[in-house]
């Protein structure tokens, strides 16, 4: 099968294109929007498939931010902590096609809500895969991404607001579900 991973900035400290792409797998790198380096060294072992990276351990709410919207997940998590005093978990999944079932299972212990934020279409997307995983549990899943449509001549800010892809709208939806 083909493994899909999000694109990574080549200027990230520790990123070695030569090393990470000599795998025994067919890889498709998902082209994202503008990637901005946070300057942190990448410690992820990309030869181990479908293992997410928990970048902040917390409780009650977990944010899983895919691709270029990982930074939106970080911002929304920080704002949620400011408003509630509860530190949420933040996860960078890296992989679009697979799930880290071990990590998702662990989240059930101390989390009531899992929030997915993806830079793609919701229908049949990453968030639906996470929602399906939690389908038989008490964990509530909120998916944020784009509606399946083909807008013509659009304002990016309007599209983001329409799809609740701003930290303010994400927080409002989370607060309504806690």
Image: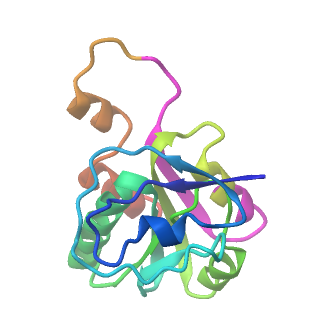
Q: Residue 5 in the image: state x and y as whole percent.
A: 55, 56
Q: Residue at horizontal 55%, vertical 40%?
A: 122
**Can see residue 178?**
no
Q: Residue 150 in the image: state x and y as whole percent.
A: 45, 17
Q: Residue at horizontal 73%, vertical 70%?
A: 137
Does 159 appear in magenta? no
Q: Residue at horizontal 38%, vertical 78%?
A: 42
The answer to whether 84 is drawn above or below residue 50 in the figure is: below
Query: Residue 143 versus residue 40: which sits nearer the camera?
Result: 40
**Can see residue 74?**
yes
Q: Residue at horizontal 27%, vertical 80%?
A: 40
The total of numbered circles placed on residues is: 0
Query: Residue 34 versus residue 163: which sits nearer the camera?
Result: 34
Query: Residue 81 versus residue 149: which sits nearer the camera?
Result: 149
User: Which stretch did the figure color magenta?
Assistant: 131-150
In the image, is 97 to the left or to the right of 81?
right
In the image, is 175 to the left or to the right of 6?
left
Q: Residue 38 in the image: state x and y as whole percent.
A: 22, 71
Query: Residue 169 versus residue 17: which sits nearer the camera?
Result: 17
Q: What colour-coding does the image apply?
A: rainbow
């Amino acid at each position: 099968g083909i493994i899909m991973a999000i694109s990574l900035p080549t200027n990230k400290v520790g990123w070695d294109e030569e090393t990470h792409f000599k795998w025994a797998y067919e890889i498709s790198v998902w082209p994202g929007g503008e990637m901005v380096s946070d300057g942190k060294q990448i410690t992820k072992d990309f030869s181990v498939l479908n293992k997410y990276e928990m970048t902040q351990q917390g409780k009650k709410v977990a944010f899983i931010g895919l691709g270029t919207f990982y930074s939106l997940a970080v911002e929304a998590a920080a704002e949620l902590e400011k408003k509630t005093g509860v530190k949420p978990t933040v996860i960078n999944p890296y992989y679009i096609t697979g799930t880290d079932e071990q990590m998702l299972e662990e989240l059930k212990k101390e989390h009531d809500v899992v929030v997915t934020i993806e830079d793609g279409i919701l229908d049949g997307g990453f968030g639906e895969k996470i929602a399906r995983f939690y389908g038989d549990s008490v964990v509530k899943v909120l998916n944020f991404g784009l509606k399946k449509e083909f807008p013509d001549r659009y304002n990016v800010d309007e599209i983001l607001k329409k799809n609740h892809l701003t930290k303010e709208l994400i927080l409002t939806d989370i607060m309504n579900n806690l």
